[in-house]
Amino acid sequence: MDLTVAADRAALDKARDELGPGRIALVPTMGALHEGHRSLMRLAREHADHVVVSVFVNPLQFGPDEDFSRYPRTFEADLRVCEEEGVRVVFTPSADDMYLPDRQVEVSAGGMGGVVEGAFRPGHFDGVLTVVLKLFNLVRPDVAVFGQKDAQQLALIRRMVADLDVPVSIVGAPTVREPDGLALSSRNRYLSEADRRTALALSRALRAGAARGQTAGPAGILDAARAVLEEAARFDPPLLLDYLILADPATFAPAGDDHRGEAILAVAAKVGTTRLIDNVVLTL
Ligand code: AMP
């Protein structure tokens, strides 16, 4: 079946009507699609009859010093990916179509939006939740798929759906990695070869922490991961650590020594001008 490109909300409404009966799964993205996005589309197909992908670089979730203007935009290639993955509709609104000039109301990510990743990116999660809720209202999916790669985002979307009674099921998808461990990201294309070698320390640190988790508690896990990151701080270019945390995967509160069950080991760091995040889920 053919792929329909809907460039504004009127076109989306028409395309949605033409889908006919069946469940709809939405995969929200910012484009520059890679294997990680493909895996979300495949998972979406398992949960619904029709897959809708949105491609929208959301200005609301970028800070003033972040990479909004240089964020990679690869529209033609993205359409081919969607076509190959059997996607029925690609929704590619403009910022003007999404946001009214006199808009006032936004979703607040609350306290949980201000910790960990949110402490380094003020307002980021408010922007994410606002655009995701708008996409839910526009596409009206039965299911929406998000990557575990952005673990705090996934947790906050689950929180929003529960707190605001949003009628959509949220499915989390595992992180897709390069063979050497680097988590796929649209931002990886900013990395030089030397940057990339340094960037590998993120996944290496998470593996070191996870390996220690077999026998050690939170402090031992963090020590093992931190040792790898400290070594990479002496590489050329250096790894510049924003945070390393062991946290409760639902709340992102720090996991203390008495924490039992799942915990998320999450890291964020800059390599040159590129900011990368990664995480693994452990059972304590
Ligand atoms: P983005 O285009 O970066 O906003 O990501 C769109 C969706 O793809 C989000 O739900 C991300 O969590 C997910 N995603 C990004 N990278 C990966 C990856 N390496 N593996 C799985 N999902 C990913």
Image (spheres, rainbow, N blue to C red):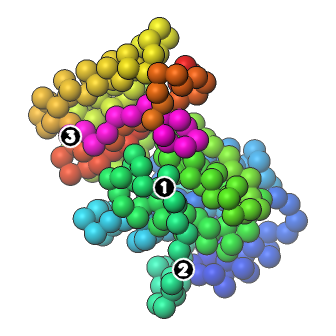
Q: Distance between the residues labelled 1 and 2?
A: 18 Å
Residue 41 position (above or below residue 96): above
Query: For the image shown, how many numbered marks are present on the structure?
Result: 3
Q: Is residue 236 visible?
A: yes
Residue sitting at the far front: 258
Residue 194 is left or right of residue 101, and the answer is left
**In this figure, which residue is indicated by the disc labeled 2?**
105
Query: Along the polypeptide, which appears first: circle 3 or circle 1?
Result: 1
Numbered range of the magenta stretch = 240-253
Return the x and y of residue 133 as percentages of the image width and height: 62, 67
Q: Which amino acid does label 2 sit on?
A: Val
Q: How far apart are marks 3 and 1 (CA)?
A: 26 Å
Q: How far apart are marks 3 and 2 (CA)?
A: 36 Å
**In this figure, which residue is indicated by the disc labeled 3?**
240
Categorize mark 2 by other alpha carbons within 10 Å: few (<14), some (14-19), many (20+).
few
Return the x and y of residue 227 as percentages of the image width and height: 25, 21
Return the x and y of residue 187 as percentages of the image width and height: 34, 51
**In this figure, which residue is indicated by the disc labeled 1?**
111
Q: Is residue 25 visible?
A: no
User: Which residue shows up at 72% across the image and 75% down it?
Assistant: 15
95 and 156: which is toward the camera: 156
Name the quadrant of the N terminus.
bottom right
Q: What residue type is labelled 1?
A: Gly
Residue sitting at the far top: 215
